[in-house]
Image (cartoon, rainbow, N blue to C red):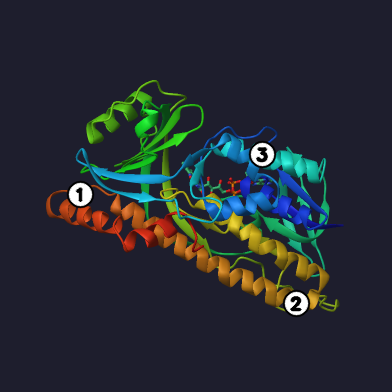
Amino acid sequence: MRDVVIVGGGPVGTMLACVLAVGGLDVEVLEQRAQPSLRSRAIGIHPPSLRALAAIGVADALLERAVRIRAGEVRSDGRKLGQLSFERAAPGYPFVVALPQYETEALLRARFDELRPGRYRSGVTMTGVRDRGDAVAVSTDSGPIEARYVIGADGGRSRVREAAGIAWRQLGRSETYLMGDFVDTAPTSTHPGAVLYFERGGVVESFPLPDGRRRWVAMTDFLATDADSADLAALIRHRTGVRVVEPLGAASAFAVQQRLARRMHSKSLRVPGRPMSGPRDAGRIVLVGDAAHEISPIGGQGMNLGWLDAVALAPALQRALLDPAAAASVLATYDRTRRSAGRRAALQAGFNMNMGRPAHGARLRARNAVVRSLTLPPANEVVARAFTMRWL
Ligand SMILES: Cc1cc2nc3c(=O)[nH]c(=O)nc-3n(C[C@H](O)[C@H](O)[C@H](O)COP(=O)(O)OP(=O)(O)OC[C@H]3O[C@@H](n4cnc5c(N)ncnc54)[C@H](O)[C@@H]3O)c2cc1C
């Protein structure tokens, strides 16, 4: 029987696997995809995550590939409203870095493979999970497995969460965006880093990526699934006046919604005829990452938040395995602190989305005044802290 089986080998499941392996636990990851995804969803990686990546020996390789973003600029109507510096973001990491998610995932998988060769099992789908009280039985399309704890790191549509009977609560309304990568034409000498364009028709964001690329994201009125890179380029030009050239790959439309699980672990079961091996309130199924909270990508927090879940969960699991009597209290602390971090991240993302909505006349002027004041002392330090996730 394994100490821990992690369902889902995305960025959060694989990070947790590395942290647990470094801590000496017997851990296995089940990933339904036979081949890695090439979707570049998350790009922004914040200082607290860089510290966590350093602790598992991945930061150096990641920093070698990633682009360092030291500042963000806010523009409207062709003018600069303000600038935020990340220089004082964290000792050792005075920047946010950008790297496509598939590259980050590949680095994490490679590290876990070094730590536990053969324990990242691609092409294995979890089909059912049952907390028996003293262990968890996992069914997969390649046969059954047992573990002391099972972690649902299986994303927003988590089957683990469903099987554990944990409800899912929607926060706020949904928004739609169109996203694509283009050749970065900004001159190196005056490179603006990240740029947010708060325009009348809705926000447009742009971020540098490695290999001379730039990611562009524009808010849209509807889910523009038929739109292509030329449509995105035209929208960017229309709203901001910036002419983007040479699309790299297809544009993609996405809708964001924010959701939070009601609990981050299952409740323990009382099995008839069998004495409880652990305390009453702590089940053996625990959620991390998007399985527990889906946060709007606007502000780039979801993957980072999941990684910080992993950092908090690893010592809790170690303690629960060593001392079953402590399981209820350590998992309750995990549940309380990480759901509270999830709520804060959702609030911040909600604020970001709100600021980015279409605005005209007095509302536009008021919004620009708020943005200006947020980029000036003393507010700018607090905003930089929030944007570099030092409070999550
Ligand atoms: C457009 C976009 C941009 C984003 N930008 C950012 C950003 O800049 N910064 C940031 O922090 N976040 C960002 N995010 C959010 C980020 O992508 C997610 O928060 C992150 O992918 C969550 O990781 P995860 O490992 O929890 O879940 P996932 O990435 O969804 O991984 C879950 C894994 O579980 C596997 N799985 C599912 N079911 C099963 C099963 N039954 N059996 C076995 N395996 C299973 C899946 O195949 C998948 O590999 C962005 C999201 C989007 C859509």
- The disc, 3 or 2, on the residue closer to the chain's N-terminal end is 3
Q: Which mark is residue 359?
A: 1
Residue sitting at x 41%, y 27%: 182
Q: CA distance from mark 3 to mark 2?
A: 34 Å
Q: Amino acid at mark 2?
A: Ala
Secondary structure under the numbered disc 2 in the rendered image: helix
Question: Is residue 131 visible in this depiction of the protein?
Answer: yes
- Among numbered discs 2 and 1, the one appearing first in the sequence: 2
| Mark 1 Cα-neighbour bin, 10 Å: few <14, some 14–19, many ≥20 | some
Q: Secondary structure at mark 3?
A: helix
- Image location (x, y in percent) of residue 57: 70, 47
Above or below residue 214? Residue 256 is below
Which numbered circle lies on residue 346? none
- In the rendering, which numbered label is found on residue 326? 2
In this rendered view, identify the residue nearer to me: 319 or 137: 319
| Direction from residue 325 to residue 11 in the image, left or right | left
Residue at the image point whose x is 70% and y is 43% from the top: 31
What quarter of the picture does the N terminus occupy? bottom right
For the residues carrying marks 3 and 1, which lies nearer the camera in this image? Answer: 3
| Residue at left offset 64%, top offset 42% | 60
Residue 139: percent from left, percent from top: 77, 51
- The amino acid beneath tag 1 is Ala
Residue 345 relative to residue 81: left or right: right
* Earlier sequence position, callout 3 versus callout 1: 3
Instruction: Examine the image and state in which quarter residue 261 appears.
Output: bottom right
Q: Amino acid at mark 3?
A: Leu
Query: Mark 2: few, some, or many residues within 10 Å (few <14, many ≥20)?
Result: some
Q: Residue at x 41, y 48 (%)?
A: 298
Q: Which residue is mark 3?
A: 107
Q: Is mark 1 within 8 Å of ligand 1?
A: no
Q: Nearer the viewer, residue 261 or 324?
A: 324
